[in-house]
Image (cartoon, helix red, strand yellow):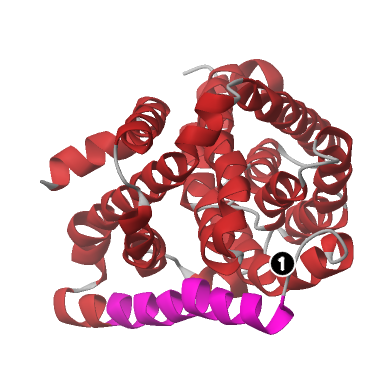
Amino acid sequence: MFGILQKLTRNLIYAIPAMMLAGFAYGLWADTAWLKTAIIPFTFLMVYPMMVTLKIRKVFEGGDAKAQVLTQLINFGLIPFLTFGVGLLFFRDKPYMALGLLLAGLVPTSGMTISWTGFAKGNMSAAVKMTVIGLVAGSLATPFYVQALMGTAIQMQLAAVFKQILFIVFLPMALGYLTQRFLVKRYGQQTFQRDIGPKFPGLSTVGVLGIVFVALALKARTIAAAPGVLLDILVPLLLLYGFNFLLSTLIGKSLLPRGDAIALVYGSVMRNLSIALAIAINAFGTQGSDAALVIAMAYIIQVQSAAWYVRFTPKVFGLPEELAQPA
């Protein structure tokens, strides 16, 4: 079973569109009301496994302070306001779709930040720190950004959103950390890293695919009535990801060594869409499905663009030192 899950995780570029199509088909032909009861289980299955493998202690290691500061300046000083502005431009009459765009820009980094950094031969230690810092800071900051930027356009109770984030992020984080310590104590660090830890991302993938299925099923009839809405969503997402990749690449190439620069790109472009999706669909009621649709579409752009960027990394940043030097 875990082999199948790992294969799914490696092939998200195909699995997510396939699950979106399946959810769309189901939503057209079947009753979707019961699917709302699956949201909480899928949310927990999506978030908890990635917390089990999160290396929280890495945050306290030094050596890449400049990369960390630059990454979080992009993540919290620029991207939220950029996504808000693009949302105003493209979704002026659809505030909950604008909310989805904003949520997609508010929680930086995911487990894939570390994976893609590794694929591109970047500084994985820096990527781990970016992931933990971005996850915690983004989760705490999200309600305040939403309240400040969109409080007049959407119905939002700050305390209710915080309660959802506590349940969606910090409870699984605590349980994941306790699980990690228990498994390390019982089986040893080496066995955990080699044999046990790699199995958990596949479980998270099941949660992601489940939530994507639910999000598309709930919006299927709306999409069928106005299919142009998908194009309306794709255009601003392409603009956002394109600008983010370009900006992060220029900053990283200008100011940082190769490994740190690659970590900065993936630490600022990759968003934690799993948590954004969970917040949208749990904290904003039935109207949150509009926001969830935008975030589900963002998965396609994010995974595809990250994979292509790995291919172009040697041309942008050059080869890593161990490959660039003659034997």
- For mark 1, give the secondary structure: helix
Q: Residue at x 75, y 61 (%)?
A: 65
Membership of 169 in magenta stretch: yes
Residue 146 seen in this snapshot:
yes
Q: Is residue 263 above or below residue 66?
A: above
Membership of 103 in magenta stretch: no
Q: Which residues are magenta?
A: 157-181
Q: Is residue 153 above or below residue 250?
A: below
Give x and y (percent) for residue 99. Answer: 72, 52
Q: Is residue 125 above or below residue 6?
A: below
Residue that protrudes farthest toward the left in the picture: 1
Q: Is residue 38 left or right of residue 296?
A: left
Give x and y (percent) for residue 104. Answer: 66, 48
Residue 121 seen in this snapshot:
no
Label 1 amino acid?
Answer: Thr
**Crowdedness near tag 1: few (<14), some (14–19) or many (≥20) residues, C-alpha within 10 Å:** many
Give x and y (percent) for residue 223. Answer: 54, 30
Q: Is residue 30 left or right of residue 126?
A: left
Q: Is residue 261 left or right of residue 20?
A: right
- Overall secondary structure of the magenta section: helix
Query: Residue 218 occupies which quadrant of the picture?
Result: top left
Q: Residue at x 68, y 54 (%)?
A: 103
Q: Nearer the viewer, residue 11 or 68?
A: 11
Q: Residue at x 79, y 72 (%)?
A: 144
Query: Residue 175 occupies which quadrant of the picture?
Result: bottom left
Q: Is residue 219 left or right of residue 150?
A: left
Q: Is residue 150 above or below residue 188?
A: above
Query: Residue 309 occupies which quadrant of the picture?
Result: top right
Q: Residue at x 56, y 41 (%)?
A: 293
Q: Nearer the viewer, residue 208 or 127?
A: 208
Circle 1 is placed at which residue position?
A: 142
Give x and y (percent) for residue 88. Answer: 87, 42
